[in-house]
Image (cartoon, grey):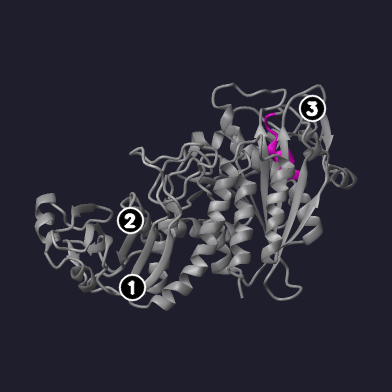
């Protein structure tokens, strides 16, 4: 197990113990501060033997020469200079974290030849390091590492850089977002027997300590509001539903807020349209959209974002008992529109229908973005490297795409249109909740579009990216926390000030 390390920042100086991790440019060139860590020229001898040329992400790990106060020397290639993106610096931090192993004293020398390493670069490196060291092992009673040893104390990481004070300030901002990602990961990883709708709402309530106003609507209150779509999903579970309304008002007084809405199905059995047994345990993560919204609100409040933001999550459990809704049932949503339930496993859109309508009617936001692990069909289309993006507004869609490119929480825009909309018409009600096999992600988005009126809106289908996505340099967890960095970037770039 890797415990969360402590991170400090210091002026460039040769480290006096532990492990020194230095960066090198392509061709294996070290900065002056990195060279000072290796007076015995161990790297000079190791680089040719390892055929090391400083390409991005390539690592050389050597024992420190006799007489050195250090235990190990590690070089990590930073590739071509000087154009490293924010995400590239995060990846370097993740790669550095992978080299820490059980070292207690780690020095990372953020120095590159002929390149200015900014405080923001150093902060991104530190953020990537924290994200890489995340692990969800709270339920393990034996927490030995790979070598069978009890876990050590948290590693103490000192990042040596040109301007420690500025790096420390930049890292406070970066750490707010990192902690938001970690909150989202924890929520998605948590088993459903300990995280029901009530418990999820209680977790969100903790944001009040940061200045977020949090309201929790009970099933009785939702009933009075006419949320028949959401309550229909919840009626098969003995665990009552909750809707959580979070408000961070860091912008100008009375300025129109922006809004984020998350699907929070804490466990999805499929209901009467029950899922196959294989892999059903993963449906504890069907609240990845709500987890991302909660993590985002933490990030924005912690870093005191200068924006007015509403976050709404609909938390339910989709189970089956004698009271569960059936295929063929017709429910009335808060909007007054009626829905024929064709498939009880198409439940997330029912939850979002009432959440989106409530958000729009109460707050009149300048835009709404919803996130949901909504369809398996989006994974057939895009795999696990892009989330599906659907939108009625080109400017909002373009800004989301740009934020996805910047953070590498990537999106791919898919179409909407009247031809697809007709596929959810039914003779028995205003619409049906499932249109069959073809264009499954698109028809789900068309369903949601009926509950946003003319408000600019985007739907992110994150079924392939929020859970079970491929491990990478900054995430080794089943739950990725997808969406927190993406949406924080969207807010930061366009909606603050």
Image marks 1 and 2: residues in contact by CB distance under 8 Å: no
Find out whether residue 351 is within the magenta segment. yes
Where is residue 192? Give x, y as percent: 64, 36
Write the start and end of the magenta stretch as one range: 345-353
Disc 1 residue crowd, few under 14, some 14–19, many 20+, Cα 10 Å: many
Is disc 3 placed on a helix, strand or loop? loop
Is most of the magenta stretch helix, strand or loop? helix
Residue marked by disc 1 = 161
Closer to the chain start, of discs 1 and 2, is 2
Compared to residue 287, the image places residue 368 above or below, namely: below
Where is residue 407? Give x, y as percent: 46, 57
Is disc 2 placed on a helix, strand or loop? helix
Q: CA distance from mark 3 to mark 2?
A: 51 Å
Q: Is residue 23 left or right of residue 241?
A: left
Q: CA distance from mark 1 to mark 3?
A: 60 Å
Residue marked by disc 3 = 325
Residue at 38% from the left image edge and 68% from the top image edge = 122
Marker disc for residue 107: none
Residue at 79% from the left image edge and 27% from the top image edge = 325
Quarter assignment of residue 7: bottom left
Find out whether residue 21 is within the magenta segment. no
Disc 2 residue crowd, few under 14, some 14–19, many 20+, Cα 10 Å: many
Compared to residue 79, the image places residue 98 above or below, namely: above
Marker disc for residue 96: 2
Closer to the chain start, of discs 1 and 3, is 1
Disc 3 residue crowd, few under 14, some 14–19, many 20+, Cα 10 Å: many
Residue nearest the observer in this picture, 153 or 294: 153
């Amino acid at each position: 197990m890797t415990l969360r390390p402590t991170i400090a920042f210091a002026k460039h100086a040769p480290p006096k113990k532990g492990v020194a991790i230095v960066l090198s440019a392509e061709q294996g060139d070290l900065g002056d501060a990195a060279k000072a860590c290796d007076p015995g020229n161990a790297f000079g001898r190791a680089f040719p033997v390892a055929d090391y040329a400083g390409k991005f992400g390539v690592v050389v790990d050597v024992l420190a020469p006799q007489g050195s106060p250090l235990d190990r020397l590690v070089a990590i290639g930073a590739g071509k200079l000087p154009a490293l993106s924010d995400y590239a610096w995060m990846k370097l931090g993740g790669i550095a974290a992978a080299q820490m192993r059980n070292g207690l004293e780690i020095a990372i020398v953020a120095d590159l030849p002929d390149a200015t390493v900014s405080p923001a670069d150093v902060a991104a490196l530190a953020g990537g390091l924290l994200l890489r060291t995340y692990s969800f092992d709270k339920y393990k009673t034996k927490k030995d590492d790979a070598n069978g040893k009890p876990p050590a104390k948290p590693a103490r990481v000192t990042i040596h850089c040109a301007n420690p004070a500025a790096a420390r300030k930049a890292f406070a901002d970066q750490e707010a977002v990192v902690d938001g990602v970690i909150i989202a990961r924890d929520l998605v990883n948590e088993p459903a027997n300990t995280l029901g709708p009530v418990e999820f709402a209680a977790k969100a309530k903790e944001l009040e300590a940061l200045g977020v106003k949090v309201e929790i609507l009970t099933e009785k209150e939702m009933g009075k509001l006419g949320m028949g779509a959401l309550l229909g999903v919840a009626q098969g579970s003995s665990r009552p539903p909750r809707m959580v309304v979070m408000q961070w008002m860091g912008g100008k007084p009375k300025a129109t807020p922006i809004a984020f809405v998350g699907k929070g199905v804490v466990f999805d059995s499929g209901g009467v349209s029950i899922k196959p047994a294989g892999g059903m345990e993963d449906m504890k993560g069907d609240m990845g959209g709500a987890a991302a919204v909660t993590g985002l609100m933490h990030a924005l409040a912690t870093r005191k974002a200068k924006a007015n933001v509403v976050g709404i999550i609909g938390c339910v459990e989709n189970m089956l008992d004698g009271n569960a809704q059936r295929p063929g049932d017709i429910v009335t949503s808060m909007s007054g529109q009626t829905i024929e339930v064709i498939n009880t496993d198409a439940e997330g859109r029912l939850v979002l229908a009432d959440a989106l309508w409530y958000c729009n009617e109460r707050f009149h936001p300048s835009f709404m973005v919803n996130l949901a692990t909504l369809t398996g069909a989006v994974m057939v289309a895009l795999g696990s490297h892009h989330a599906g993006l659907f939108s009625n507004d080109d400017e909002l869609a373009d800004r989301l795409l740009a934020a996805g490119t910047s953070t590498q929480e990537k999106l791919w825009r898919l179409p909407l249109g009247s031809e697809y909309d007709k596929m959810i018409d039914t003779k028995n009600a205003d619409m049906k909740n499932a249109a069959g096999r073809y264009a499954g992600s698109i028809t789900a988005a068309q369903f949601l579009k009926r509950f946003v009126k003319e408000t600019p809106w985007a739907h992110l289908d994150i079924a392939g990216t929020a859970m079970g996505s491929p491990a990478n340099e900054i995430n080794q967890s089943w739950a990725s926390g997808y969406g927190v960095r993406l949406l924080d970037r969207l807010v930061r770039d366009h909606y603050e000030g």
